[in-house]
Amino acid sequence: MIDLRSDTVTRPSEGMRRAMYEAEVGDDVFGEDPTVRRLQDRIAALLGKETALFVPSGVMSNQIALKVHTRPGDEVIVERQSHLFNYESGAPGLLSGVQMNVLDGERGTLTGAQVAAAVRPGYYWEARSRLVWLENTINKAGGTIYPLERIEEVARVARAHHLALHLDGARLWNASAATGISEQAYAAPFDTVSVCLSKGLGAPIGSVLAGPADLMQEAHRYRKLFGGGMRQVGILAAAGLYALDHHRPALAEDHARARRLAEGIATLPAFRIDLDTVETNIVMFDVVDGEAAPVLEALKAEGILMVPFGPATIRATTHRDVTHADIDRALAILTRLFGATS
Ligand SMILES: *Cc1c(COP(=O)(O)O)cnc(C)c1O
């Protein structure tokens, strides 16, 4: 199988398993797991934030952030393609009682002017604008990078209106690997930042939320309240530390494989792809005359897995468990199945 469904399908590498086996542990609900503390300190420093908190998933990390920034009845400004709006099971309504002001941006990005226009003036019959929510890289837009100037433009507007700012940086590592701009520079305009260890970094589980100490104290409380208090999870934090040291430097190779796949797909008339959107490890393309489902079925029969991202849209994601040879094989099969011009 060449599994291109997501960068979450990776298996822990041998070195990672060894690091997990050897991890020093303690009860993290008592704050006594030294490996968890090391991971949290490491990521806080990487992101230039005061404190960080290890949590089981990216969704929990995002939802804790949402909870600490808002009160029920508040409004969150968010782009339509965001993970928060599309893939978090309606949690913002259930857990934080907030409503979302969903804006249509360009490839998942908002301009400062758009955000400024969406901020409510504060009449008592309106929801209270409280938080601006950005994502980097933007999954649904094709793993695209939020340009730093754009982020700073939005941040200036948010500050001017006294709004909080959160970054869903599940794949922030990929943005940094692609641009050379540090995670810290990308994180600087935000109050809180969430990063995932279980995507391209290849850890089996784990995300980290980082931010200022006062907010993170509240975050710690909500992690427990949401059922995310964990015990001897140095075993899992060790995987995260290993991933930062040994897997992170290889992310650019995922990007090269995605590029190669995208350029191959671009030569096939059955598909339409905007190569400009292929900036990191995600390849999003459309079926020109038909639907995604039969294409995905045909590929599956040949041992290639991708996922639908709309009726005629397909997503393929590269990761550390697909090789250059796998990509070549996938392209050969795509060409055999869909390369003939009718
Ligand atoms: C994967 C992802 C998350 C969190 O997902 P989990 O499966 O809960 O870890 C959040 N935001 C984005 C952009 C993601 O891609």
Image (tube, rainbow, N blue to C red):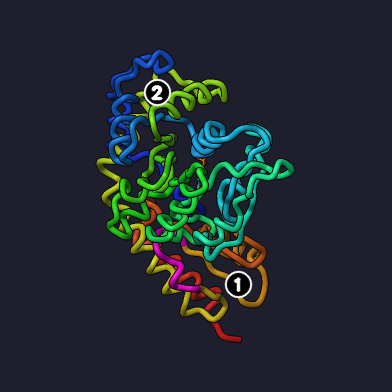
| Rendered position, 109 above or below 224 | below
Q: Quadrant of residue 279?
A: bottom left
Task: Say if residue 122 shows up in the picture.
Answer: yes
Q: What element carries label 2?
A: loop
Residue 269 placement (x, y as % from top left)? 54, 81
Q: Is residue 243 left or right of residue 10?
A: left
Q: Quadrant of residue 33?
A: top left
Residue drawn at x 50%, y 43% as measured from the top left: 162
Residue drawn at x 51%, y 54% as measured from the top left: 5
Residue extending farthest to the right is 125
Label 2 with label 1: CB-CB less than 8 Å: no
Residue type indicated by callout 2:
Val
Q: Is residue 299 left or right of residue 319?
A: right
Instruction: Name the residue beneath numbered marker 2.
Output: 233
Give the Cα distance between marks 2 and 1: 44 Å
Residue drawn at x 44%, y 73% as measured from the top left: 275
Image quarter of the C terminus:
bottom right
Callout in the foreground (2, 1)? 2
Mark closer to the chain start, 2 or 1: 2
Residue drawn at x 55%, y 23% as measured from the top left: 227
Task: Say if residue 2 shows up in the picture.
Answer: no
Residue 27 magenta-highlighted: no
Q: In this view, does 164 lie to the left or right of 293?
A: left
- Within 10 Å of disc 2 (Cα), the crowding (few <14, some 14-19, many 20+) is many
Residue 161 placement (x, y as % from top left)? 52, 47
Highlighted magenta segment, given as a residue range: 274-282
Instruction: Name the residue beneath numbered marker 1.
Output: 287
* Numbered disc total: 2
Q: Which mark is residue 130?
A: none
Residue 78 placement (x, y as % from top left)? 58, 51
Q: Which of 166 and 320 is in front in this view?
A: 166
Residue type indicated by callout 1:
Val
